[in-house]
Image (tube, rainbow, N blue to C red):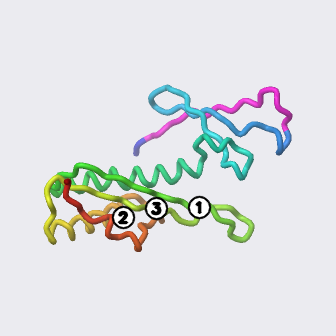
């Protein structure tokens, strides 16, 4: 079992403590010891220039997926040069409860050497294995499946 810790600090300051007025900005300190400011989403009176919990959730899933895929690719001896993801999460109201109903990952993977059909299929298998490694209910966008395929560098 691995332990993961953060420190979160919120301070009311001079603002009134009412729903409309209390500050949503807060500090989160990760392993590097540097506090970073986050907030609520603008729809919840947060600062839209700051990351919010939903952004962090989407980022965590995308990062887990990428790191798992890199590990699988390295073990299969595929040399990758880049991995980009344009992930999006959806916070939706379901019966009066807000929750992240889905996260769509759109990985774009580039290998060092031009992939052949077998490498391309193995890369897609690696994406499938990665989905299983990150125990989530996230999904890749099927309309952009081709972006998960290996592409040679130019």
Disc number for residue 145: none
Region in magenta: 3-17
Label 2 sits on a secondary structure element that is helix
Is residue 89 shown above or below 7? below
Q: Residue 23 colored magenta?
A: no
Disc 3 to disc 2, C-alpha distance:
8 Å
Q: Is residue 127 left or right of residue 29?
A: left
Say which residue label 2 marks: 132
Disc 3 packing (10 Å; few <14; some 14–19; many ≥20): few
Mark 1 lies on a secondary structure that is strand
Label 1 crowding class (10 Å Cα cut-off): few <14, some 14-19, many 20+?
some
Disc marking residue 100: 1
Q: Give the overall secondary structure of the magenta segment.
A: loop
Label 3's element?
loop
Give the spatial CA distance, label 3 vs label 1.
11 Å
Determine the residue positioned at 62% across, 61% down: 91
Q: Image check: 82 left or right of 61?
A: left
Labelled disc at residue 136: 3
Q: Residue 64's spot in the image, x, y percent?
A: 39, 52
Q: Give 154 or 115, whichever is nearer the viewer.
A: 154
């Amino acid at each position: 079992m691995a332990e993961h810790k953060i420190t979160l600090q919120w301070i009311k300051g001079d603002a009134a403590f009412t729903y409309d007025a209390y500050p949503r900005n807060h500090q989160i300190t990760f392993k590097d010891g540097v506090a970073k400011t986050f907030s609520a989403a603008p729809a919840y009176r947060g600062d839209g220039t700051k990351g919010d919990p939903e952004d962090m959730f989407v980022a965590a899933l995308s990062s887990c997926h990428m790191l798992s895929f890199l590990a699988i690719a390295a073990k299969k001896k595929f040399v990758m040069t880049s991995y980009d993801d344009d992930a999006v999460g959806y916070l939706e109201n379901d019966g009066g409860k807000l929750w992240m109903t889905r996260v769509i990952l759109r990985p774009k993977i580039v290998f060092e050497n031009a992939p052949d059909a077998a490498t391309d299929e193995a890369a897609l298998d690696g994406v499938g294995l990665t989905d299983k490694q990150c125990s989530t209910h996230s999904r890749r966008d099927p309309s952009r499946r081709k972006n998960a395929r290996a592409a040679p560098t130019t």
